[in-house]
Amino acid sequence: MSAPAVRARFAPSPTGYLHLGSARTALFNWLTARHAGGELLLRIEDTDAERSKPELIDLIFRTLGWLGIDWDGEVVHQSQRADLYRDAVERLLASGQAYWCSCTPDEVKARAEARGGKPGYDGHCRDRGLGPGDGHVVRFRVADDGDTVIHDEIRGEVRFPNADLDDFVLLRSTGVAMFHVANAVDDLDMAITHIIRGEDLLNATPKILLIRQALDPAAPAPTFAHLPLIVNEKRQKLSKRRDDVALEDYIARGILPEAMANYLALLGWGPPDGVEIRPMPEIIERFALADVTKASAFFDVAKLEHINATYIRELPVDQFVNRSTHWLFTDTPWPAERFSAERFELLAPMVQERVRTLSEVPGYVDFVFQADPTRDDASWEKVMVKDPALARRMLEAAIAGYEALEGDAWQLQAINDTVIGYADANEISRKKAQAPIRVAVTGRAVGPPLWESIEVLGRDETLRRLRVALDDLPS
RNA sequence: GCCCCCAUCGUCCAGUGGCCUAGGACGCCGCCCUUUCAAGGCGGUAACACGGGUUCGAAUCCCGUUGGGGGUGCCA
C-alpha cells in the first residue's frame, strides 16, 4: 500500500474553546484531505503544558465532531513526546547547527536596546562553545546569508532573507523544546505532506523549515498553504474580547452545524459554479487549495444566518422539532410545565419557515405557553392606540363570532371566516382587520399565521385574551 | 523600527490580457404575491485604491505610492 498523496493535519493548542479561525483551518485541512482521498491527522500542540487539560482537549474533539469533521488514526499529543523533541535538539547540537546560550531574556533585550532599538538576539553566544548549564537555552544557528524560500499553494513563492532571522531558541532553559521544534519533528515523523494553517503563522514558517532541513535534509519539503485570516468589521483578527470567536457561541445561538460548515467554506473560497449553499460532499468535490483567496475575509453574521435559515427550511419537520428541543426547555419565557409538545408541533412547520436561527424559535410560540402573552409596546401602540375605534370594532366582532363557534365549530376555516367575513362585508382591509386580534392574542404585530395560532390556543383562552385587550383599549 | 502578506460593489466570492458598458451571493431599496412576518418572484443600488509603465489592447503583467493586516517571546 502506497502512502496517500495527501496527509494533512490539524494542530490546535487547547485554549478552552474552538476558535472560528481554527475551525476554518480544520475545515480546509479536512476538505483538502477528503478531496484527495487522503488523510487528516489530529495533533494537540500542548508543549506549553499548562493548558493541557483533558477536558479542554475533549471540547475540541466534540466541537470538531459537531462541525462534521472527522480524522484518521490516533491523536498525537505533543505533551507526551518531549523526549523526541529533546533528541532532535541533541542531534542539532551534535551537528553544530545549534548551540548553547547563557543569555537571559533581559540581557538580550538590553543589548538590543543598546544597539539601537532593533529587537532580537545578536548571536552573542554563537561561538562561545558553551555547554548545558543553569539557565542555558539552545539556539538554532541561522545562516548569515541566503534565503529561506517556502512554496505556498495560495501565495506562491515567499522568500525570507536569512539575515533577517536571528538565532531563535530551540530548547527552553527548563529543558522543554519550543513549539517550532515539536512542529518540525512531528510533521516529519507523521509524514505530513500538506501544512495548511492561518496566515498569522507565515512568518514562523522559515524557522520550521530550517529546523526540518537541518534534521532531515533528504525529506521533501511539504506543501504549505497559509489561509487568509478571518477578521471583524474593523478588519482585524477576531478578538475574544470583542467578537464571538468560539464556535460554542454560535451553537448556543442556534446555528446548524451544516450551515456553519458551509459558511466557513465560503470564507476564502467559492465554488467555480457560484452555487454557494450546497451539501458538503459537493463542496469536497469542488474544493481546491489553489483556488483559495489571498485577502482576509470578514465574518458576516448576516450571511451566516441567511445560510442557516436556508438549512432550517430544508429540514424535515420532525428534524426541525428535534433540533429545536434545547431551545424549548432552556431559559424559556414560559414555565416548563406549561409547555406542550403537541401544540408546538402544530405550529412548527410555520415557525420553521420564519426563523433564521433556532434560538428564535421560542419567540414565535411563547404566546401559546405563557399565561398571558408578553405585550410588545410598539405593537400595542401602533395597532391599538393609533386607531382604537377600529381595534374595538374588530375585537368585538371577533369575540361575538368566536363565542358562536362552540364545540366542533371551532375549526380553522371558521376562525378565518369569522374575521375575514366581517372585514370584507364592512370593507375593512384584511391586513388592518387582523392586526388588533393578533396583538390581543399574541402580544405582537408579527408572528406565525394568525388563524392557526388561534386554533392552537383554543377558544376559551382566545376569548379571554380578546376581552382583556378590549378592556385595556384606550377610550 | 524591521520582516512578511494583502488590495474588485458595504460584505463574501467570479474574473488569470480582448467575451467586462465587470458577474453571482448576502445586505439594503422598490414592486408583486399575501391576514402579519417570513419564504418566493421581479427590478434596482453599489466596486476594479492611486500613479507610472509593458501592450494594438489591462481589473487582469511589472514598478512605485497609499491604505489595511500579520509577525517580530525561553506563547502556540
Image (spheres, coloured by chain):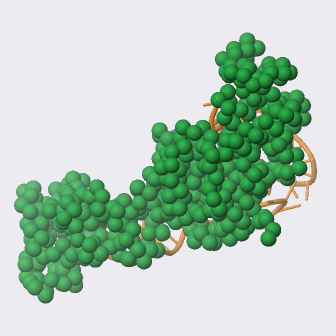
Chain colours: A green, B orange
Count every numbered label the image shows and give the total.
0
Residue that sits furthest to the bottom in the current view: A408
Q: The C terminus of chain A lies in which quarter of the figure?
A: bottom left
Q: Nearer the viewer, residue A376 or A20?
A: A20
Q: Where A17 falls versus A115 (above or below)?
A: below
Question: Can you give x and y, in whole percent of width and height, for residue A247 in the image?
Answer: 49, 53
Question: Can you give x and y, in whole percent of width and height, for residue A322 in the image?
Answer: 37, 71
Q: Residue at (78%, 54%) from the top-left corner?
A: A223
Residue that sits furthest to the top in the current view: A114
Tell me the quarter of the picture where residue A348 sits.
bottom left
Q: Residue at (84%, 21%) from the top-left corner?
A: A129
Q: Residue at (15%, 75%) from the top-left corner?
A: A458
Q: Where A118 falls versus A380 (above or below)?
A: above
Tell me the quarter of the picture where residue A35 sits.
bottom right
Q: Is residue A269 visible?
A: no
Tell me the quarter of the picture where residue A388 sits.
bottom left
Q: Nearer the viewer, residue A282 or A115?
A: A115
Q: Where A272 falls versus B71 (above or below)?
A: below
Q: Is residue A332 visible?
A: yes
Question: Can you give x and y, in whole percent of width and height, for residue A306 in the image?
Answer: 48, 62
Q: Residue at (33%, 61%) from the top-left corner?
A: A327
Q: Is residue A58 left or right of residue B17?
A: left
Q: Is residue A129 left or right of residue A425?
A: right
